[in-house]
Image (tube, coloured by chain):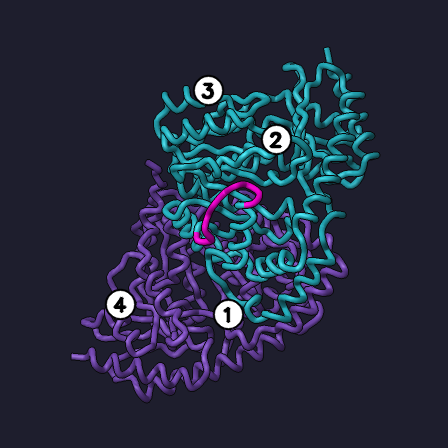
Chain colours: A cyan, B purple
Amino acid sequence: MVRFAKRLDLLDSSDIGDLLRLIARPDIISFAGGLPAPELFPVEALKQAGLAVMEEMGTIACQYSSTEGLPQLREKIVERMAVKNNIHATPEQVLITSGSQQGLDFAARVFIDKGDVILVESPSYLGAINAFKACEPTFIEVPTDDGGMVMEELEKVLATTENVKMIYVIPDFQNPTGRTWSLERRTKFMEIVNKYEVPVIEDNPYGELRFENDTMPALKSLDTKGVVVYLGTLSKIMVPGFRLGWVCAKDEILSKFNTMKQGADLQTSTLTQLQANKYMDMNNLDEHVNKIREVYKHRRDVMMKAMKEYFPKEAKFTYPDGGLFTWVELPDYIDTKEMALQCLEKKVAYVPGGSFFPNGGKNNCFRMNYSCMSDEKIIEGVKALAEVIQANLK
Amino acid sequence: MVRFAKRLDLLDSSDIGDLLRLIARPDIISFAGGLPAPELFPVEALKQAGLAVMEEMGTIACQYSSTEGLPQLREKIVERMAVKNNIHATPEQVLITSGSQQGLDFAARVFIDKGDVILVESPSYLGAINAFKACEPTFIEVPTDDGGMVMEELEKVLATTENVKMIYVIPDFQNPTGRTWSLERRTKFMEIVNKYEVPVIEDNPYGELRFENDTMPALKSLDTKGVVVYLGTLSKIMVPGFRLGWVCAKDEILSKFNTMKQGADLQTSTLTQLQANKYMDMNNLDEHVNKIREVYKHRRDVMMKAMKEYFPKEAKFTYPDGGLFTWVELPDYIDTKEMALQCLEKKVAYVPGGSFFPNGGKNNCFRMNYSCMSDEKIIEGVKALAEVIQANLK
């Protein structure tokens, strides 16, 4: 009898996977994904970049390269973090990963022994929760409100809990809620984590996709003690199919991530690193990001307008300043997982909210994505959804 | 105080890493690596493949794709395994990984809880041992001889050990020894593991690089109970910088690997998968592999001839039928880690053998690679090495 490791017991609940497969049908208007809009990919420019790489350094692109990642790409990332996030790091403090998902996996493996405590926002990113589960942690969910994680609650948990080994947060346009932490929360947060010296995983895939209002400083930019591990990615601002993300942390912590990377897959693809790097040499990435921002802002507007118009007043939803998602909360008595099946009949889909709470229990919410669809589909989908919600109200 | 997970305690001995960095100096003749010969990379053909992919399906190449890997690439791999290894699988039994190193990492995470036993050949691949250590296993080394793992010893261990959760083997041109298991050993091995129903990780990165004699059947081709997890890779027959490997296992086991992949990095690069797939559409991979085989065979011959000529008779070494490595055993009283420093002064390098024994202790061996160097360098390096060995003999 083949016996599997115990960590898999926690990971095998695949009902969300089953649902996601169901809604991949082409006739479904799916607000469930989190995909970048494919029509915005800089295909021609990336093609030229690939061509240039193979012509100028084809042999290097084909060969193994260093575990840490290509120096020239790490330098560009350092420059970008300085300009966009006011983070001042050296290339030696950056590890290139296969998407920031790999940074999440490594974070748990670097900090978490079985039973150790991870604090997360309640709700938090499903993919992070699942990656963390492979290290068999205990999750404590810290309550959130429109301004982000509630600091009084965080402090209470830290003051009374042993073995808090890391705190995972998405302060900008959070997945799934679309919310952004206020400046006050950020300052207070750093004060608290500096006091307790708990490592913080700051996941920032959407930060550059801000539609309005001021950019908030990254937690990492306020980090005086080196406790923040910053995760970035090119997936949402350039191209997800290349699988390029990064971890930025102070040397002692980053060296542990490098050790994990070595064992996990030796290195990220030499080709995709060189091609992305060349793209940035040959093009103005900022201009491209502006284009994405404009389109997503418009779609956010279309979705918000439709939801205001068609959703019953019992449905509360967030108004994101950027990113890809809004979060809908229905009356307690509605189970959005059951409702998802009714929505399927109306050919519209979302991700039921339950999976975003690691300890379970809150089933009256769902996540909606607006980045990946035409205006007409958004309106049509919101209308259909509104009807189903209406039918479920008591 | 930031506290790290305990698994890192096992992984932090980086003296081998320090040594490898030292010998990366360009003035050193290094037999230490395991790199494919860069002058053989099909750069032009891969460039054309990349161009075709971006022109025909650029948007798809840029987007996220499925965790399991692209169906068309998995189909090609299934066909290739059928022809080359007599393995009959379906595309659904294949997961594309970021190199076969990722398959090693997943194997441990799928099967190993802390303290569980992994059986390995003694010696075994350093990178596998390190990947496995992240799951905090106990290693038992099974003795080997020129015909591979010694079956009587394997049987003894299995009969007397609890919690053997997997057996890791490289039956073809093993890393580090270059040895290949005999047919009798393979048959006997499958008999034994079928009896005990222990999962087997068959790592086969070099199988297609056979220089002479008959191909041996893959263990997976003799697997009647579905206990063998087969790891393959394009790194040694096409291109390592794309990071493309695969896991082939029966459905129940593979689904666990898919779960790990989802959490670890969502998926392998869409672009590199499509580009490798297109390369295989546009070119004859077999012809390319023949070319590699010819060059490596020649270099093996040059190295063997030089070692026979210059090495003192006290140095025993293996004669590989294929692959990238030979393994040298010196008298017990010579410590090859200390000797490596003397070699550095003579500007020649190898990997000291100690790191290939997970439980330590055998320090009179070293591994040499011949795939990546000119005839002249091979001869010059072997001469220099011979002098150092001679000087260390009592």
The residue lying toward the viewer, choosing from B163 and A289, is A289
Report the side of A333 relative to A348 (left or right). left
Amino acid residing under circle 1: Gly
Q: Residue A181: x percent and y percent? A: 56, 28
Q: Give the spatial CA distance, label 1 vs label 3.
A: 57 Å
Amino acid residing under circle 2: Pro
Image marks 2 and 3: residues in contact by CB distance under 8 Å: no
The residue stretch that appears in magenta: A83-92
Report the side of B338 relative to A367 (left or right). left
Q: Residue B128: x percent and y percent? A: 41, 57
Asked if the stretch drawn in magenta spans residue A341, the answer is no
User: Please, which residue is most extreme toward the left here?
Assistant: B394
What kind of element bears circle 1?
loop
Q: Give the spatial CA distance, label 4 vs label 2.
A: 52 Å
User: Please, which residue is most extreme toward the top here?
Assistant: A394
Q: Which residue is mark 4?
A: B337
Task: Check the residue under mark 3 and report the chain it is in.
Answer: A
Nearest-to-viewer mark from 3 and 4: 3
- The label on residue A176 is 2
Tag 4 and tag 2 share a subunit = no
Tag 1 and tag 3 share a subunit = no
Amino acid residing under circle 4: Lys
- Count residues near mark 2 (Cα–Cα under 10 Å), then give few for <14, some for 14-19, many for 20+: many
Report the side of A179 relative to A221 (left or right). right
Residue at the location (69% across, 30% down)? A368
Amino acid residing under circle 3: Glu
- The label on residue B207 is 1
Q: Give the spatial CA distance, label 3 vs label 4.
A: 54 Å
